[in-house]
Image: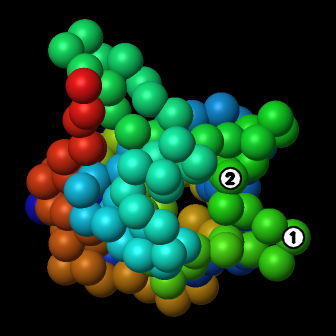
């Protein structure tokens, strides 16, 4: 565990949706994410992939990522928020506690410029932060041919 967050970090989502919009990126899906989202939208996995995903080439196959709208919003972001919030992917559930953000204080401060929830609200304990990091460390995006 990093000394940087040993006393916890303040974070509380402010509902700005910045993490779901504004910039291009990938929301890669694991097998579990794909299953949960397919179930949420009452469709089989193949239909879900063909409707809501893009295939990102990785050399020997493809990773599955959610589509983005033309303005880079997530395909599931509506004016009322996330249309699949209860079943949102692991990548979404663990933000902002990702390994590339919880590097050090400087990186955390830099992310706070984009996310108004960082450094606000309740203090998240180091144990919970580490749990999210561990989940992301074990995350394996679904790969298809």
In the displayed structure image, the side of residue 26 where residue 74 appears, left or right: right
Describe the element under mark 1 as helix, strand or loop. Answer: loop
Where residue 23 sits: x, y (%)? 70, 36
- Position in image of residue 28 (x %, y %): 40, 44
Q: Residue furthest bottom?
A: 122
Q: What residue is at 52 percent from the left and 34 percent from the top?
A: 54
Q: Is residue 36 rendered to the left or right of residue 11? A: left
**For mark 2, what is the residue?**
75
Where, quadrant-wise, is the N terminus in this rendering? bottom left
Q: Left of 37 or right of it: where is 16?
A: right
Give the residue at x 24% y 35%.
143
Residue 57: quadrant of the picture: top left
Residue 118 in the image, given as x and y percentages of width and height: 58, 66
Give x and y (percent) for residue 127: 19, 79
Pick out the residue farthest to the top. 59
* Dot 1 and dot 2 residues touching (CB under 8 Å): no
Indicate whether 109 appears above or below 145: below
Where on the picture, by quarter, is residue 145?
A: top left
Label 2 CA crowd tier, 10 Å (few <14, some 14–19, many 20+): some
**Is any part of residue 104 visible from this angle?**
no
For the residues labelled 1 and 2, the Cα–Cα distance comes to: 12 Å
Q: Which residue is drawn at 32% across and 66% down?
A: 35
Q: In this view of the protein, can residue 12 be seen by the observer?
A: yes
In the picture, the disc for residue 79 is 1
Vertical order, 110 against 63 (above or below): below
**Mark 1 or 2, which is nearer the eye?**
2
| Residue nearest the observer in this picture, 136 or 73 | 73
In this view, the residue in front, 75 or 25, is 75
């Amino acid at each position: 565990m990093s000394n940087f967050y040993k006393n916890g970090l303040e974070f509380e989502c402010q509902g700005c949706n910045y993490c779901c919009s504004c910039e291009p990126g990938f929301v890669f899906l694991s097998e579990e994410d794909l299953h949960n989202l397919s179930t949420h939208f009452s469709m089989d996995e193949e239909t879900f992939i063909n409707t809501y995903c893009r295939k990102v080439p990785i050399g020997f196959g493809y990773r599955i990522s959610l589509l983005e709208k033309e303005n880079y919003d997530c395909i599931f972001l509506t004016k009322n928020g996330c249309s699949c919030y209860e079943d949102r992917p692991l990548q979404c559930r663990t933000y902002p506690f990702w390994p590339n953000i919880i590097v050090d204080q400087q990186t955390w401060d830099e992310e706070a410029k984009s996310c108004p929830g960082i450094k606000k609200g309740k203090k998240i304990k180091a144990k919970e932060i580490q749990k999210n990091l561990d989940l992301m460390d074990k995350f394996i995006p679904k790969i298809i041919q």
